[in-house]
Image (cartoon, rainbow, N blue to C red):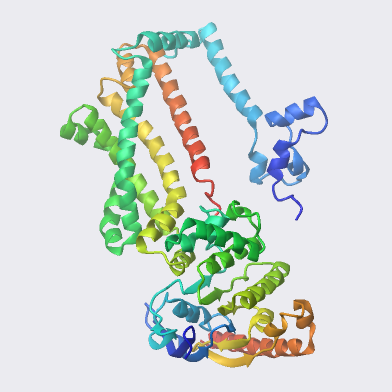
Amino acid sequence: MPDDSNPRSRASGEPEPGGFIPALLARVGLSRTGETARKTVTFGDPSAASGGRFWSILSVSVLAALWVLSSIYEWVNPIFWPAPGAVWDKFVEISSEGYRNFTLWEHIGWSLYRILMGFGLGCLVGIPLGFAMGLSRIMRGMFDPIVEFFRPIPPLAFIPLVIIWSGIGERSKILLLFLAALWIMAIAARAGVSSVKLSKIHAAYTLGVNRRQLLFRVILPNALPEIFTGMRVAMGVCWGTVVAAELVAAESGVGFMIMVASTFLSTDIVVMGVIIIGVVGYGIDILMRKLEARLIPWKGKG
Amino acid sequence: MNEAGLSVEQVSMIYELPQGGRVEALRDVSFQLDPGGILTVLGPSGCGKTTLLNILAGFLAPTGGQATFGAHEISAPAPERGMVFQQGALFEWLNVAENIGFGPKMRGVPAGETTARVEHLLDTVGLQGFGDKAVYELSGGMQQRVALARCLANDPQLILMDEPLGALDALTREKMQSLILKLWRDTGKTIILITHSVEEALFLGQRLFVMAPRPGRIEREYRLPFAARGFDESLRDIKATPEFAGKRDEILAMIWEMEEEIMGRTESA
């Protein structure tokens, strides 16, 4: 069989013909290569909208340039929007000297610690719950209304209750994040269990599995892709929720930093915090995707 | 009755529909199958052939009659009765060798023994060197080779095949038909194969059942020489003989008529 089944390996593996400039253009996504170069219908073809790296660089550069220019020509009052230099200075200062008893890294570390605890507990309870709901009519019947009721409630709506129950310490934040992750993970695990093809279950039984083997050797690995998708979603929600929870009440964390800075009108610190939230959130998702590609290479190939 | 023989006695299957009414998927199906035989089952959709296979596998309990394999009534799936599915029943989280070795591993066969057996089976189905490949990297035909090997690894006495070649292109399909014939000859397993393809049923079946719908039943049985001749003659030569062509046309006409009848009934209903 000719090896034309995998055009991507060819497109990225071999050097582009036609010299340096066309190769560079192709590399940044300004020109099309391989078979896509000869496609006459592009509008609506999903592959025509991929690989626009040049435009990503352009849009980010333009935003950055606008920011620099606006500060040089003082288009905006720095109280509303600080200069990039000021934000950078604060970043250097807080990463070395700290802010409110904690360095920048400790603030980030505290936020991440809360997420990992809450998310971890959410997985620990949510995944078995989802499995039970996917495997038993009684469990499905009992927990479906509960899960479906709590799922659309934004976790932040629980902040007042959680503070009344557990105060403003670590426990209340971890409890909140646990609630944020729990329903997402339960639903993801349930979907993963329900997605199994009956022929796989039947095949396993004719191959002589017992129930425990079926659960751990067939149903669990089969559900992993959906569980991992749920984990990515839950991670994103937890990150957003922890920052918001720290805005309300905390003594450390990125959200806490922003909240305190805002009461002193230190917009430079606020903006720095916002950028850090974005960067860390983006970083978490990239990490989860890398993990997914490594741990579950069979995703979408069933 | 021989130890590994299959006996089906007056098996019926009636589904009660939730909105009322009932469907007679099978009515009084009876047959015996000796060890080492190969039986193909053919029929239009809705004739109950998949229901029959699921009863023999032990996934369904019939509403009437009973199916016995060896000394025991069939009541649940068991490794003595292996099954090969149409497609998508491989475990994509395991590589080819792990898929083939799955059954022995689950039953606690020592790893060394399984490895040797898997190597041998890879060879048997023509997949030497593919052991550490991911199953989703293989073509449809190769995936079905893995499915056959995975079933054989467990050394079942009876192999049930539910349209194993149904999703393959015509050329791959013929190659796989020869492979199934070769496996039958080399292993001496009892095989029941369900198919939509008249040619496949004729070529592979020592015995062939043509089933009819409403109620699902065995309409006609053939005893055929083609599977035995397939040991010496090529598949294409056999399919080109006048006997083969004659049987094919006869059965096609029969199924055509059944389909017409179904259409007529649904139109008048």
Q: From the viewer's perspective, is residue B21 above or below residue A268? A: below
Left or right of A187 in this view: A82:
right
Quadrant of residue B64 within the rendered picture:
bottom left
Q: From the viewer's perspective, is residue B199 above or below residue A139? A: below
Left or right of B202 in this view: B96:
left
Camera-side residue of B84 and A266 = B84
Quarter of the image where the N terminus of chain A is located: bottom right
Residue B56 visible from this viewpoint = yes
Residue B43 visible from this viewpoint = no
Image coords of residue B188 (percent x, y): 59, 78
Left or right of A28 in this view: B162:
left
Q: From the viewer's perspective, is residue B184 above or below residue B154? A: below
Image coords of residue B82 (percent x, y): 50, 72
Image coords of residue B174 (percent x, y): 71, 72
Image coords of residue A295 (percent x, y): 49, 43
Point 58% across, 65% down: residue: B149
Camera-side residue of A112 and B23 = A112
Point 51% across, 9% down: residue: A71
Point 75% across, 38% down: residue: A33
Camera-side residue of A122 and A291 = A291
